[in-house]
Amino acid sequence: MNIQSVSDNERLVVSPGRAWHMLGIGNTHGYQLLATGELDSYLDGRRRLITVASIKRYVERKIASASAASTCTPRLRTRAAETGVAR
């Protein structure tokens, strides 16, 4: 197998830039996730690597919290709905 053909799902670790790309976030949010322990990482020499397993766990937690919030949270009322006036 060619090393360059390995997909992100098959890798065990990725660089921060690749992790941010996978999550669709920027540097600031990505490094905040590292600082708060939401993502697991380690240094290999001077290179920071983030585990793909921790990225998947983070996404699973976000999906679970979003689905829990959508089933428990009542719908927000809009002013137009309250007054019967459309914008």
Image (cartoon, rainbow, N blue to C red):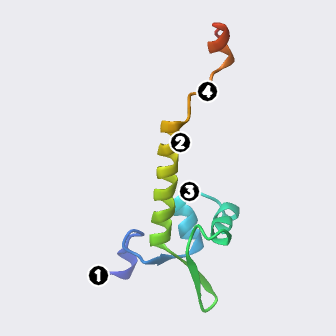
Residue drawn at point x = 39 percent, y = 68 percent = 9
Is residue 87 visible in the rendered image? The answer is no
Query: Do callouts 3 and 1 mark residues in contact (Cβ within 8 Å)?
Result: no
Mark 4: which amino acid?
Leu
Who comes first in sequence, dot 3 or dot 4?
Answer: 3
Relative placement, left or right, of 13 versus 4 is right
Q: Which residue is labeled 2 in the image? A: 69
Residue drawn at point x = 47 percent, y = 44 percent = 67
What secondary structure is found at the residue carrying circle 2?
helix
Mark 3: which amino acid?
Gly
Q: Residues within 10 Å of mark 3 (few under 14, many from 20)?
A: few
Residue drawn at point x = 53 percent, y = 59 percent = 23
Label 2, label 4: how far apart the Cα atoms are:
13 Å
Q: Which residue is labeled 4 in the image? A: 76
**Outermost residue, left side:** 1
Who comes first in sequence, dot 2 or dot 1?
Answer: 1
Q: Which residue is labeled 1 in the image? A: 1
What secondary structure is found at the residue carrying circle 4?
loop
What secondary structure is found at the residue carrying circle 1?
loop
Find residue 48 and report its horizontal and vertical position in percent: 60, 81
Label 1, label 4: how far apart the Cα atoms are:
52 Å
| 68, 39: nearer the viewer | 68
On the image, which quarter does residue 49 sit in?
Answer: bottom right
What secondary structure is found at the residue carrying circle 3?
loop
